[in-house]
């Protein structure tokens, strides 16, 4: 997740009050070559002590991206040693039973995300 999305999720969890603790942010890197476990841990902790960062090898990353229909591509930078990653911008929301319930578009208003999560958290 990009920093903007993680910051939005932090705002949503705060807006949810005590129910925010019931929302577990998890992101999966699309760049395992650059994102070492140490880098991911530090990055995740910048957005909350309980944010989880997952990393697989190149083949695992490709398989998960295909499963979730996530596009990603390395984009060369201005020098041979630099690059960025283009990727699908959005977040999947799973319920407590592990079922996908929502897809949150990048840039969706925090208030709308909060409202959707309140409805989902109210389900039994």
Image: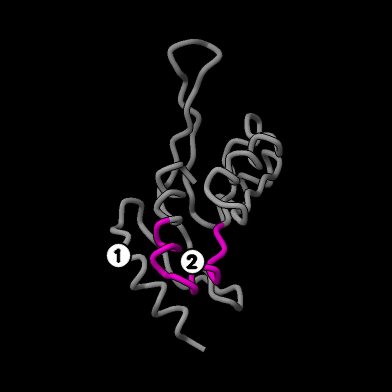
Mark 1 lies on residue:
111
Q: Residue 96: give its label.
A: none
Q: How is the image coloured?
A: one colour
What residue is rendered at 50% in x and 29% in y? 74
Q: Looking at the image, is 2 positioned above or below residue 18?
A: above
Circle 1/circle 2 CB separation < 8 Å: no
Q: Position of residue 116 (x, y in %)?
A: 36, 72
In magenta stretch: residue 96: no
Specify few, some or many for label 1: CA neighbours under 10 Å numbering under 14, 14-19, or 20 or more. Answer: few
For the residues labelled 1 and 2, the Cα–Cα distance comes to 16 Å
Specify few, some or many for label 2: CA neighbours under 10 Å numbering under 14, 14-19, or 20 or more. Answer: some
Q: Position of residue 87 (x, y in %)?
A: 45, 41
Q: Position of residue 81 (x, y in %)?
A: 56, 14
Magenta span: predominant SS is: helix
Q: Looking at the image, is 105 positioned above or below residue 32?
A: below
The front one of 74 and 106 is 106
Determine the residue located farthest toward the bottom in the rendered image.
Answer: 124
In this rendering, position of residue 55 left or right of residue 19? right
Mark 2 lies on residue:
93
Query: Which type of secondary structure does the marked residue at label 2 adopt?
Result: strand
The front one of 111 and 68 is 111
What residue is rendered at 58% in x and 77% in y? 96
In this rendering, position of residue 77 left or right of residue 67? left
Query: Which type of secondary structure does the marked residue at label 1 adopt?
Result: helix
What residue is rendered at 49% in x and 74% in y? 19
The span picked out in magenta is: 11-25
In magenta stretch: residue 21: yes
Q: Looking at the image, is 118 positioned above or below residue 28?
A: below
Q: Looking at the image, is 110 positioned above or below residue 44?
A: below
């Amino acid at each position: 997740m990009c920093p903007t999305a993680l910051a939005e999720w932090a705002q949503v969890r705060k807006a949810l009050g005590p129910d925010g603790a019931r929302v577990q942010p998890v992101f999966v890197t699309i760049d395992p070559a650059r994102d070492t476990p140490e880098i991911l841990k530090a990055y995740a902790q910048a957005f909350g002590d309980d944010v989880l960062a997952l990393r697989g090898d190149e083949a695992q990353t490709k398989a998960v991206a295909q499963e979730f229909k996530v596009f990603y591509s390395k984009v060369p930078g201005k020098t041979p040693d630099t690059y960025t990653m283009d990727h699908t911008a959005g977040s999947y929301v799973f319920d407590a039973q592990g079922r996908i319930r929502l897809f949150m578009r990048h840039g969706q208003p925090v208030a709308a995300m909060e409202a959707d999560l309140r409805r989902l958290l109210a389900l039994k």
